[in-house]
Image: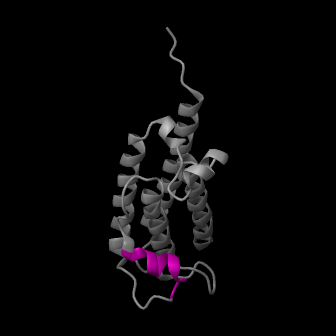
Amino acid sequence: MTTSISEETTFVTTAIKSWDAWVGRAGKFFDSLSDQDMLHEIAPGKNRPIYLLGHLIAVHDAMIPQLRLGELEYPHLKEPFLTQPDRAAAELPPTAELRQNWKDLNSRLNALFAELTPDQWLERHATVTEEDFANEPHRNRLAILLSRTSHASYHLGQLMLLKK
C-alpha cells in the first residue's frame, strides 16, 4: 500500500528544510569567526558580523509572536539590532551571549515549527486581520517562514564578503 503525501505537507516540509539549511549555514559561519572577527566591518562603513548575528536573532525571535506561537524570547535585542543601525547602540551584548542566544532560539523555533500541522502553516499570521486574510490567504504563517529564510540567506551572502 502506498501512502500519499499531501501537497501541503510537501510544501511545508520543503520550506522547513530550506529554513534549516540556511539557518545552519549561518550558524556555521558565525561559529567560524573569532570574537575579534565578529567586530570587523564586512566592507568599509558596512555592518559587522556581531550586528548581523544580533539582527537575525531579533528578526527570528519576532517570528514567534508573528506566527502566533508565543512571546518574544529576547525583547531587549529589538532596540540595538532592529530599531538602530550598527554602531548606534552604546553597548552590545557579549558575542558569546549572542552565539548562545542564536543556538537556543533556533532550537526553540524548530520545536515550535514541529508542533504545527501543514494546515496550521496555512493559517493567517498575527499581523493580518481575519478579514484581510479571507481576501489574501497567501498572508499565512508559511509566507513568514519563507520570507525569513530569504532574509537569512541575504545576510549570509553579505557575510561571505568577509572571506574574500
Q: Residue furthest right?
A: 135
Question: Residue at image x 58%, y 37%?
Answer: 11
Q: Is residue 87 visible?
A: yes
Q: Seen in the image, is 35 located left or right of residue 4?
A: left
How far from the left and from the top, in percent, is residue 65?
A: 43, 59
Question: Residue at image x 42%, y 91%?
Answer: 90
Q: Seen in the image, is 34 located left or right of residue 8?
A: left
Question: Residue at image x 55%, y 46%?
Answer: 142
How far from the left and from the top, in percent, is residue 67?
A: 47, 53
> Which image quarter: residue 34?
bottom left
Q: Is residue 38 visible?
A: no
User: In the image, which residues are magenta?
Assistant: 76-87
How far from the left and from the top, in percent, is residue 54?
A: 45, 72
Q: Is residue 83 above or below residue 154?
A: below
Q: Residue furthest top?
A: 1
Foreground: 140 or 147?
Answer: 140
Q: Is residue 53 above or below residue 152?
A: below
Foreground: 36 or 86?
Answer: 86
In the rendered image, which quarter contains the C terminus? bottom right
Foreground: 113 or 106?
Answer: 113
Q: Residue furthest front?
A: 131
How far from the left and from the top, in percent, is residue 15?
A: 56, 44
Question: Residue at image x 36%, y 47%?
Answer: 111
The number of discs equals 0
Q: Is residue 55 above or below residue 119?
A: below
- Taking the magenta stretch, the answer to whether it contains residue 86 is yes
